[in-house]
């Protein structure tokens, strides 16, 4: 004996079954989107790391050689101390610029998975509207 049919709950059960199937498909889509975004994020982070290491190494060598060249140029002049302090100030300014750039990139990295979060928030709003 089918109690759902006798109690008139077949339509209700079918709607719930369809909703659960649709929810499972939507969850699968969201997981796939998160996976794609994670792969993209990993690729960007790897590229950023390689470029950061390369740029850091090249910059240190170039700036050290430039600093030595400037100090050698002014070594036998009375401005030797002034040039040394100007070089130190320039290095400090360069460090500040790099720190600002790193903080900017760090803030942008906080926006990872924006599409997935937006989709999930839309799904949650839709679920709340149906309830």
Image (spheres, rainbow, N blue to C red):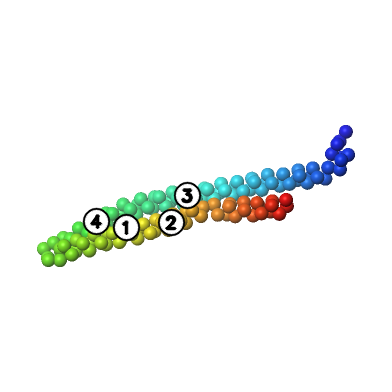
Report the residue marked by disc 1: 95
| Residue occupying the point 86% across, 36% down | 2
- 4 vs 29, left or right, is right
Which of the marked residues, 2 or 1, is nearer the chain's N terminus? 1
Report the residue marked by disc 3: 43
Inspect this view and state whether residue 69 appears. Answer: no
Which of the marked residues, 1 or 4, is nearer the chain's N terminus? 4
Disc 2 residue crowd, few under 14, some 14–19, many 20+, Cα 10 Å: few
Q: Position of residue 115 (x, y in %)?
A: 57, 54
Answer whether labels 4 and 2 touch (C-beta < 8 Å).
no
Which of the marked residues, 3 or 2, is nearer the chain's N terminus? 3
Which of the marked residues, 3 or 1, is nearer the chain's N terminus? 3
Which of the marked residues, 4 or 2, is nearer the chain's N terminus? 4
Disc 4 residue crowd, few under 14, some 14–19, many 20+, Cα 10 Å: few
The mark lying in front, picked from 1 and 4, is: 1
Nearest the viewer among 102 and 7 is 7
- The quadrant of the rendering that contains the N terminus is top right
Asked which secondary structure carries label 2, the reply is helix
| Residue occupying the point 62% across, 53% down | 121
Nearest the viewer among 7 and 42 is 7
Disc 3 residue crowd, few under 14, some 14–19, many 20+, Cα 10 Å: few
Between the residue at mark 2 and the residue at mark 1, the CA separation in whole angstroms equals 15 Å
| Residue occupying the point 69% across, 52% down | 128
The mark lying in front, picked from 3 and 2, is: 2
Asked which secondary structure carries label 4, the reply is helix
Report the residue marked by disc 4: 64
Asked which secondary structure carries label 3, the reply is helix
> What is the count of numbered marks?
4
Q: Which mark is residue 105?
A: 2
């Amino acid at each position: 004996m089918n109690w759902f049919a006798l109690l008139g709950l077949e339509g209700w059960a079918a709607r719930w079954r369809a909703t659960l199937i649709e929810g499972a498909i939507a969850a699968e889509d969201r997981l796939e989107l998160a996976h794609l975004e994670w792969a993209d994020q990993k690729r960007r982070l790897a590229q950023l790391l390689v470029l950061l290491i390369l740029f850091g190494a090249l910059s240190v060598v170039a700036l050290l050689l430039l600093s030595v060249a400037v100090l050698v140029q002014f070594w036998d002049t009375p401005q030797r101390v002034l040039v040394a302090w100007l070089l130190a100030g320039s290095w400090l300014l360069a460090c500040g610029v790099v720190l600002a750039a790193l903080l900017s990139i760090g803030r942008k990295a906080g926006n990872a998975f924006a599409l997935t979060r937006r989709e999930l928030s839309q799904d949650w709003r839709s679920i709340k509207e149906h309830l």
